[in-house]
Amino acid sequence: MAKEFILKTDWPLAETDKGTLRGYFYDGVYRFLGVPYAEAARFEQPHETEAWEGVRDALDFGLICPDPEGPEARQPHGEIQVPHRFWPHSEHCQNLNVFTGTLDKNAKRAVMVWLHGGGYMGGSAIEVQYYDGDNLARNEDIVCVTVNHRLNVLGFLDVSAFGPQYDNSVNAGMADLVEALRWIRRNIASFGGDPDNVTIFGQSGGGGKVAALEQIPAAAGLFQKAIVMSGSIPDDDGLVKNTIEGKKVAEAIMEELGSPEHDFNVLLEAPDFILENATNRALNRLRSDGWEIGWGPQKNGWYEGYIGYNDVSEHQKSIPTIFGTELCEFGRIPIADLNAVPEEDRPAIIKERFGEENGEKLIELYQKAYPGINILNSLALDVMFRPTTKDMLRKRAETCEAPTYNYLMTLEFPIDGGKRAWHCADIGFAFGNALETPVYNIPGVTEHVQEQFLKAFTSFAKTGDPNHAALPEWKPCTKDELVTMIFDKEADARVNFDDELLALYAEIAPKFKMVFPGMENDPKRWPY
């Protein structure tokens, strides 16, 4: 059956503080796409856009931040699990998309602002197909906003040594997000949203951005609730850790741009794709010399740092927050079909890796923590996000008056005989888009899991409490009881259920460490 689509010269329109926008209406949802929320000179802090006259079209997704890996990063790969979209780019990527079911300025619907994944290096507001907010707007009465911002060298290179206008260049990408939230606060009522009921949510790097915004005083009052999905990223994680000062990184990039005398202007004048290429070359060289270099927010007077190692900011203490992870996240198991391995043969595989005594103990604790789940999944136990998430849960439970909730997805998907929840597996459910993505379709299961998971998110966004009629009671964490809602075919709340398991795993398995190795550079291909 055909769906209703409407686009007229004078409708639908929305008034913002900078001018009038024209979007379109499709299947019960108003879409306003590629809306500019800020602008900035390279490495500088963002500021509000200029006003415009007349009506500005908001019919197309905006340009996204350039990817540091170049065209190679835009090759189809792993699309069954995480279906991607690829899009033109520009460093002038401060734009957002609004999905809403009403343009009534008095509707005061809860607002959910999505911060995309991809670490702090890549990704975009439209990168993954199930990032679209239509079903949140259509079925859940949510105003959904998805945001693009500066990343990698454009958003997180510390060039503070080259002028006062660059004092916070190392956090420019996060400053973009603060400016986006300011735009939302000023304008979201025109899209049916409540500026005093804003929830920020994000996954992976996007989850890290959510957690970082809770530690940025400039963001105080711009959002009231937060959801961190697989995004506990400590300051010493390889994604963001730097053992070299920003000035030396900048000078290495200048050298790759053909300025051995370190003329800062070459950094400002190089086209963004050339800057990205030169940065990769410089990082390869520096990493080969033993330096660790990552992109991401850095603690300074503007950002107060990861809460696992720093005091909890005052504004975070009043923000209800959900933290969640996946059972397997980035775990890789060298067995094509775990469920095809006879049950009696599984213990030997685990003991071969961990030894007889440790293997036996691991099996015992894994079965205790995850009854009914194939023990071979213990070979892919998440040691990247789950332990640091628990650190954050405890820190908040001890210091925050606002409630802190925790979830873990363990659902098995129909890939190669059965694959448990991986990094990104929960996103389709969070947007209500599971049935629109092939791999999520599990007869008799998907609709129920989505109802439990999605409505937990939207109930939380509306009220600060994830509980709803289709879900078992979900209590907040305390310093003594970390309550975890397990999302599987049926949701189940458990308390301190994997403490012993993770403690053993920390002893017998090497800690996962994100490392970006230096690689040999290809010959230069640009005119610098």
Image: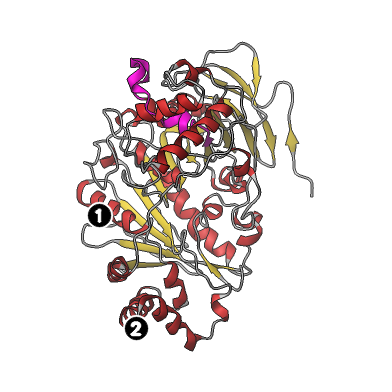
Q: Vertically, is 513 above or below 364?
A: above
- Which structural element holds mark 2? helix
Numbered tag placed on residue 394 in the rendering: 1
Numbered tag placed on residue 316 in the rendering: none
Q: Which residue corresponds to the image point at 38% horizontal and 55% vertical from the top-left?
A: 385
Q: Earlier in the sequence, mark 2 or mark 1?
A: 2
Query: Residue 433 colored magenta?
Result: no
Which sits in the foreground, 369 or 192? 369
Residue 198 locus on image (x, y percent): 42, 37
Q: Vertically, is 203 above or below 480?
A: above
Tell me if 435 is positioned left or right of 43 in this view.
Answer: right
Q: Amino acid at mark 1?
A: Arg
Tell me if 510 is positioned left or right of 53 in this view.
Answer: left
Which sits in the foreground, 505 or 244? 244
Which sits in the foreground, 484 or 439? 439
Q: Which residue corresponds to the image point at 30% horizontal and 28% vertical from the top-left?
A: 302
Residue 267 locus on image (x, y percent): 48, 21
Q: What range is drawn magenta here?
A: 146-168
**From mark 2 to mark 1, how far is it between C-alphas?**
33 Å
- Which structural element holds mark 1? helix
Numbered tag placed on residue 356 in the rendering: 2
Residue 251 locus on image (x, y percent): 40, 25
Q: Which residue corresponds to the image point at 33% horizontal and 54% vertical from the top-left?
A: 389
Q: Is residue 373 visible?
A: no
